[in-house]
Amino acid sequence: MSARRSFQRAGEVARRAALIDATKYLIAEGGPEAATVRAIAARAGVTPGLIRHYFSTKEDLVAATHESLMTGLTEAAAARLDELPDDPIARLRGFIAASVSPPVTGPRAMALWAAAMQLVPRDAAMRRVHAATYLAFRERLEGLISDALRAAGRPVDSATIRAHAIAGNALIDGLWIEAAALPDHFFNIDLPALALSAFSRLLDLPLEE
């Protein structure tokens, strides 16, 4: 009986993920207006009525799609941390570089992000998701900055770390957005090196390789 329940749950998780993936594809290709219930169902290979089994409204599905995108980008940026030595400077350097490198960067992720940002100011669910995922990334950055400053023998206080993380997140976002929107203008620029150089100045730490 428990094996059957486990199998059923795995199937439900897979179907929910398929609906989110279909929504991502449609929004990336045609914007939020392209992600109609009928189009999402067709792309996912389910009936339109089945969507209501997993999401109360289409808006809930779109919010879940944004959460999946943003959480996935943070996880992709952090994926290399386990491979790095137990050195706070190296770990901060790796996280920054990964945040402006593939697979985090790219036109598809940018298209999804830009489409979602149209909805954030006027949709409460989207605003909650965006706030939560933004804070998750920023808190990860705060922890890495705090560890690196401590390792360098620098004084650490929460207000300073928070300010550094806000500024650093904005720096990463700016490079990420412009490089995805105007790739031809950045084809011969080493974005990780540029980001590390800027962070080195922001934190007064030797992050450049």
Image (cartoon, helix red, strand yellow):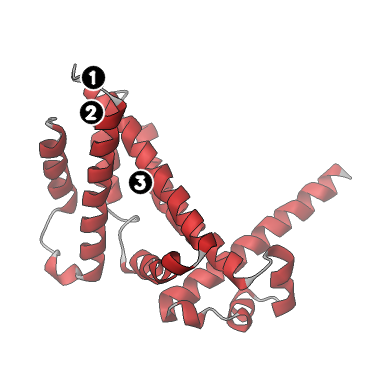
Tell me whether the residue at label 3 lies in contact with that at label 2, contact meaning CB atoms closer than 8 angstroms: no
The quarter of the image holding the C terminus is: top left
Q: Relative to residue 69, is residue 107 depicted above or below?
A: below
Name the foreground residue: 3 vs 17.
17
Determine the CA span between mark 3 and mark 2: 16 Å
Q: Relative to residue 190, is residue 187 depicted above or below?
A: below
> Amino acid under label 1?
Ala
Q: Which residue is mark 2?
A: 89
Q: Position of residue 114 (x, y in %)?
A: 36, 69
Q: Is residue 45 visible?
A: yes
Report the side of 209 relative to 156 (left or right).
Answer: left
> Amino acid under label 3?
Ala
Q: Which residue is mark 3?
A: 77
Q: Residue at x 47, y 59 (%)?
A: 127
Q: Which residue is mark 1?
A: 151
Q: In terms of sequence position, does the residue under pointer 1 or pointer 2 come before the other?
A: 2
Report the side of 180 relative to 22 (left or right).
Answer: left
